[in-house]
Image (tube, grey):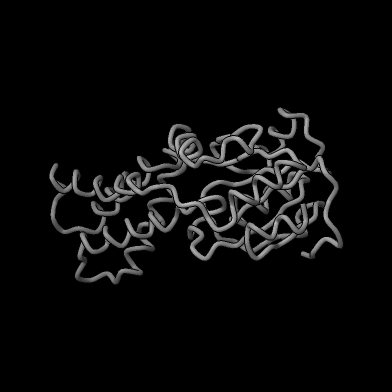
Amino acid sequence: MSALPHRLPPGQNLLIDADDTLWENNIYFERAIANFISFLNHHEYTPDQVREVLYDVERENIREHGYGMHSFAMALVKCFEQLSVEPLTPALHEAIHGIAYAIAEHPMELLPDVPETLAELAQRHHLFVVTKGNFTEQTGKFERSGLRGHFTAIEVVAEKNAQAYLALVEKYGLVREQTWMIGNSPNSDINPALEAGLHAVFVPHRNTWMLERAELQPEIGDGRLLQVTSFGHLRDYF
């Protein structure tokens, strides 16, 4: 992991993650989880123990239902059913869904320097949003963000793995040596992109989702791995 000695030439393909790279996302889920833990009010499990149960439920739920608020709401309901001594009534079910879907009420909160950085990068390079999750939710956030004009396209994939990145390379006829995946998740943005033979740029976020955390694996492919301290610093390299 190292810095480039100088700015890269124009014409790079920049695949850019959305949630927690362009705008805040996980902080709203974290607030919903805190509200759920308070609502559950478990008398034996600590809040951290409830979180561990929820993470296990989420892992299992994602395999069956994918990502997004509906999947998250289902995970909260299943977690409640596992831990609560009282039965899940229709009223409780509705209350738990309300906790989950309150996330959608938050306005878009772009991360620092994002609009001006994208405006500058788009003058020199080809920009694509590459995100995973529910198609309607992700494209809706993209439209509300006001960032659409900077991008060639948005791609919403079921999972961000090496196969997904290779499919995007083929779909758009990208040269791998000139293609970079930029994001905050080692698990979804960085390691699988490197595995696919792309370059990657890690942009840390202090509230990255627990299930997206992993060790960076710069040795996994022959691409280059960079790390910047903030999104705005991309202008120093691209």
Q: Which x, y percent locates residue 181? A: 69, 47
Spot occupied by residue 231 in the image (x, y as percentages of width and height): 63, 57
Give the position of the N terminus as an image quadrant.
Answer: bottom right
Side of 22 where 144 appears, left or right: left
Q: Residue at x 40, y 50 (%)?
A: 58
Left or right of 216 in this view: 82 = left
Count the marks: 0
Quarter-of-image position of residue 126: top right
Residue 53 image-quadrant placement: bottom left
**Measured from the top left, where is residue 132 in percent x and y?**
53, 41
Q: Nearer the viewer, residue 19 or 231?
A: 231
Foreground pick, 117 / 87: 117
The x, y position of residue 114, in whole percent, is 59, 52
Residue at left offset 43%, top offset 47%: 108
- The residue located at (32%, 64%) in the rendering is 50
Residue at 46% over, 38% down: 144
Q: Which image quadrant is residue 40 in? A: bottom left
